[in-house]
Amino acid sequence: MLHVLLVDDEVISSLALRSFLERKGFRVSMAARGADAITIFDKDPAEVAVVDWRMPGMNGGELVTHLRARRPSLPVVFVTGYSPEVEPFAAALPTPPLVLDKPVDPQAVVESIRSLLSGGFA
């Protein structure tokens, strides 16, 4: 079962997305803050991360930098309402993440995860 790390401070939308992903056969760990996500990842590394951009403590870019220090090829999907802020960061990475605008279609997240994994980024 593919393990997804879902990191977003909007708890209600995260719970809904987690439920959808679990129904699609994914195992999902959730965190509302970057530091919590790092702790989870260190104990139980995920195969893919779905990350919000703006969160308290550290933003999604900082979190991805920490996660990719542990696993450089980690596939990432940014789910954000701030695409103009995310796109320059994403484009500068050796393995660019996908960027989806909020409100996000849960099926688009599933398709993005599958696309990243089939592209050999895992």
Image (spheres, grey):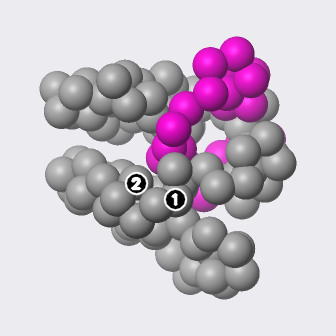
What is the number of callouts on the image? 2
- Residue 64, given in percent of the width and then of the height, sits at 70, 52
**Can residue 16 be seen by looking at this rendering?**
no
Are circles 2 and 1 on residues that touch, CB within 8 Å? yes
Could you tell me the amino acid type at mark 1?
Phe
Q: Which amino acid does label 2 sit on?
A: Leu
- Quarter of the image where the N terminus is located: top left
State the SS at label 1. loop
Residue indicated by mark 2: 117
Q: Which residue is at a point 74% across and 31% down the rendered structure image?
A: 38
Residue 110's x, y, as percent? 26, 49
Is 107 within the magenta? no
Furthest residue to the front?
A: 120
Nearer-the-camera pick, 39 or 102: 39
Tell me the residue that label 1 is attached to.
121
Q: Tell me if residue 113 comes above or below residue 119 in the rendering.
A: above
The span picked out in magenta is 36-59
Residue at 62% across, 27% down: 45
Residue shown at the point (22%, 27%) measured from the top left: 25
Task: Say left or right for 45 vs 100.
Answer: right
**22 left or right of 74 in image:** left
Eyeballing the image, is 54 above or below 89?
Answer: above
Please say whether residue 39 is one of the residues in the magenta stretch: yes
Residue at x-position 18% and y-position 51%? 107
Percent position of residue 6, x then y:
49, 36
On the question of residue 96 being in view, the answer is yes
Classify mark 2: residues with Cα within 10 Å, few (<14), some (14-19) or many (20+): some
Residue occupying the far top of the picture: 43
